[in-house]
Amino acid sequence: MIRKLGLTILLFALGSAAALAADFNGKWNGQVQGRNGMQTLVFDFHVDGSTLTGKITTPRGDTDISNGKVDGDTITFDQVLNFNGNSFTITYTGKAAADGTIQFTRQFGSAGDRPPQQFTAKRGDAPTTPAAPPQ
């Protein structure tokens, strides 16, 4: 009897943890300030357990995600870029929000290089028409 009760509690706990995990699979888009204005980023996430893989598409092309991890409603991953033989890493941390978006912070290189940037990603491909400028 105690064994069955223990098994029931274990299954309930595992089911609850799975229910709390956010669904990050699929395409997400966001806009972040770049050197030449707003830049659209499209993320194509693939989650397998706690492992996150996929691609980031920017106006410069596609980059594979590396070191991707999922922990409940939080994801972390790196984007490694190469320019003129130099490589640098952008680290992303995202948290699923109640409104169905992902609240991201991204950090270039080491913490002292540039301040972190915050932005929001929404599910789906990037908009096909540019957003109207603020008035």
Image (cartoon, rainbow, N blue to C red):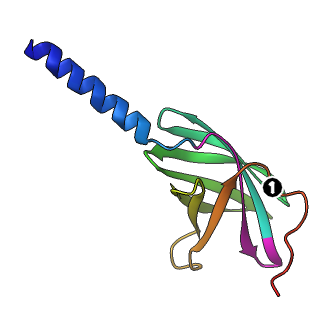
Name the residue that disc number 1 marks: 126
Q: Amino acid at mark 1?
A: Ala
Give the image location of residue 8, x and y in percent: 23, 20
Specify whether residue 14 is in view. Answer: yes
Q: Identify the residue at the far bottom of this view.
A: 135
Magenta span main SS: strand
Give the image location of residue 42, x and y in percent: 75, 53
Left or right position of 105 against 126: left
Q: Quadrant of the N terminus?
A: top left
Q: Secondary structure at mark 1?
A: loop
Count neighbours of disc 1 (C-alpha within 10 A) and say few if under 14, some if 14 to 19, many if 20 or more.
some
Residue in view at x 88 percent, y 67 percent? 130
Query: Which stretch did the figure color magenta?
Result: 24-38
Q: Identify the residue at the far left of this view.
A: 2
Look at the picture and state if 8 lies above or below 17: above
The answer to if 70 sits in the magenta stretch is no
